[in-house]
Image (cartoon, grey):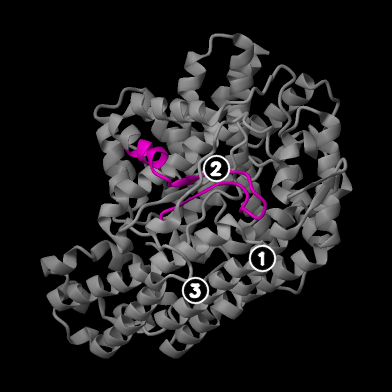
Amino acid sequence: MRPPHAPAALDLAARSTALAAPPAAGETGDLPAWDLSDLYPAPDSKEVEADFASAEAASRRFAEAYAGRLATLDGATLAAAIAEYERIEERMGRLMSYASLLFSGDSTDAAIGRFYQSVSERITAISSHLIFFTLELNRLDDAVLEKKLADLALARWRPWLTDLRVFRPHQLSDELEKLLHEKEVTGRAAWSRLFDETIAGMRVPVNGEELTVSGALNKLSSSDRAMREAAARAIGAAFGERSKLFALITNTLAKDKEIVDTWRHYPRPGSFRNRANMVEDEVVDALVSAVTADYGRLSHRYYTMKAKWLGLPKLQHWDRNAPLPEDDDRLIPWQEARERVLTAYGAFSPELAAIGKRFFDKPWIDARLSPGKAGGAFAHPTVPSAHPYLLLNYHGRARDVMTLAHELGHGVHQVLAADQGYLLSGTPLTLAETASVFGEMLTFRAMLDAETDPRRRRVMLAAKVEDMLNTVVRQTAFYRFETLLHDERRTGELLPTRIGEIWLQVQTESLGPAFEFTPEYDVFWAYVPHFIHTPFYVYAYAFGDCLVNALYSVFRSGHPGFQAKYLDMLRAGGTKRHKELLAPFGLDASDPAFWKRGLDVIAGFIDELEAAA
């Protein structure tokens, strides 16, 4: 279920290393910029004010018409009420999407920041008139609702109602729900904005050059070890100087979450996210247990080999993303990246490629490198009546091509699911990564199969393994960090040094004995945005990667009708859960063997590298 009018900025944490200072002018070709006028002409346009006025009036009429009456409505009338609720939410979603995308384009512009905050506050005020609706729906007795669902008009909304009622045991009184909703803009949202603006305004001095945080992080992938070390120490120093601020933000949000979770009776800090992802706590536990148990045969084994390839007795943390010595890391122009991705998509499914081509033919992608722009990459679905937008920071590296393939997968998924409508098109985070990771795998396989040079193949395999380790092992370690931090926060505020100790503990466990860590690494937890914006989001990357690995192995085995089933899965949007979606492929995420099947794909790539070495 899509949270009402919530911005969907995916992949910042997983892809935070794919950032950089700009390459030399012209080397990557002309990079596209998005045109947000498909949403609104400008922040001060009459269309923005008209939609605010329309949403305000419609939400008031809606409350007057339906508040306190849902139990008395027949199925057809209740279906009409949900349809009207969806129309109002979509109008607010369009406004919030526009403000969010503008802010992502330049969070240092004071006028944009003011507009973003104003939209957030006005949307919160308008949507307060609608809070009663989902609360009252959840107070309906199961038998009463089931009787109404016998009407075909209401039956369409069954998946949304089912997802909504997952939160029924955790629902508070109407007054408390309204209070929490209205205080969001001065609570969690305000602290998140402080985090974003702090990161965007930081400059990190590396070898005499003032870099954004994004540019400095990208230096950790440089082939020059001295450059990597200089960047790592500078990043540590920059965040170290602000460690009290980042610790305050982290502590405050963790305490805020504890208070809300306690009132709502969630059994543990990650439970809300699991409910929102429509996945059981036990399934997440099985995933995390499977990954942590495999640290030895995955990350520990790979990084031990990498230390030998680099000729180092031990790896420092700035060597984690270092290219292999034979990696020439040639620049790949944007046009070539486009062709590689679309060709790989087309070989799998012409329909998939045709949808993907729209993003390039129309101004739906922003790949430029500019100050104040959000780092990393994401796909924002906006609203079904418009279209998704992709944000990248394209530097012309092979990793950037993979990022493009990944984000395009999100975009295609969102286009295919849009027919389900605003309330039913959004997928849980655990499934939202399916098309993105699958698109990335298609592109990687196409590039690998076309490469005949053994040296280049090894470089490509190593890069793929590292991306998979960053997605599966690193994100699982991030999840472990959040779990330990939130658990300990319940006993009192954590000092920056203690947060650093927890960070170092999970990094040491996950990366293994090939590494040693210098003191500045203790504060690297501070730059990960998902810890702030969407607590416990990060395991969704590992979930998605392992799911796609298992799915891709089914495809490679020649499963009949795979492409058609795959497209149907994407079109389903949020109307089905993981058990229903995976059943046509003979997969079951509740089976421990499912996770092993996904991890075996990573292990197989490492086996191939080990044999080649």
Q: Residue at x 55, y 82 (%)?
A: 183
Q: Residue 438: which quarter of the image?
A: top left
Q: Which amino acid type is marked by label 2? A: Ala
Q: Quadrant of residue 153?
A: bottom left
Dot 1 or dot 3: first in sequence order is 3
x, y percentage for residue 539?
55, 50
Residue 502 visible in the picture: yes
Q: Residues within 10 Å of mark 2 (few under 14, many from 20)?
A: many
Q: Marks 1/3: CA distance?
A: 31 Å
Q: Is residue 458 left or right of residue 39?
A: right
The percent coordinates of residue 533 (x first, y second) are 59, 63
Task: Look at the image and say whether residue 365 sits in the magenta stretch.
Answer: yes
What is the number of the mark on residue 119? 3
- In which quadrant will I find the C terminus? top right
Residue at point 49%, 58% (across, down): 281
Numbered disc 1: secondary structure: helix
- In this rendering, the answer to whether 312 lies above or below 245 is above
Where residue 486 is drawn, which disc sits there?
1
Give the magenta range.
355-381
- Disc assigned to residue 99: none
Q: Is residue 53 left or right of residue 198?
A: left
Comparing 234 with 309, the one in front is: 234
- Secondary structure beneath dot 2 equals loop
Of labels 2 and 3, earlier in sequence is: 3
Q: To which residue does mark 2 refer?
A: 367
Amino acid at pointer 1: His
CA separation in Å, label 2 and label 3: 25 Å
> What residue sits 70% from the left and 32% below the top?
300
Q: Are marks 1 and 2 in contact (CB under 8 Å)?
A: no
As for residue 190 lying within the magenta part, the answer is: no
Spot occupied by residue 500 in the image (x, y as percentages of width and height): 80, 56
Q: Is residue 528 above or below residue 312?
A: below
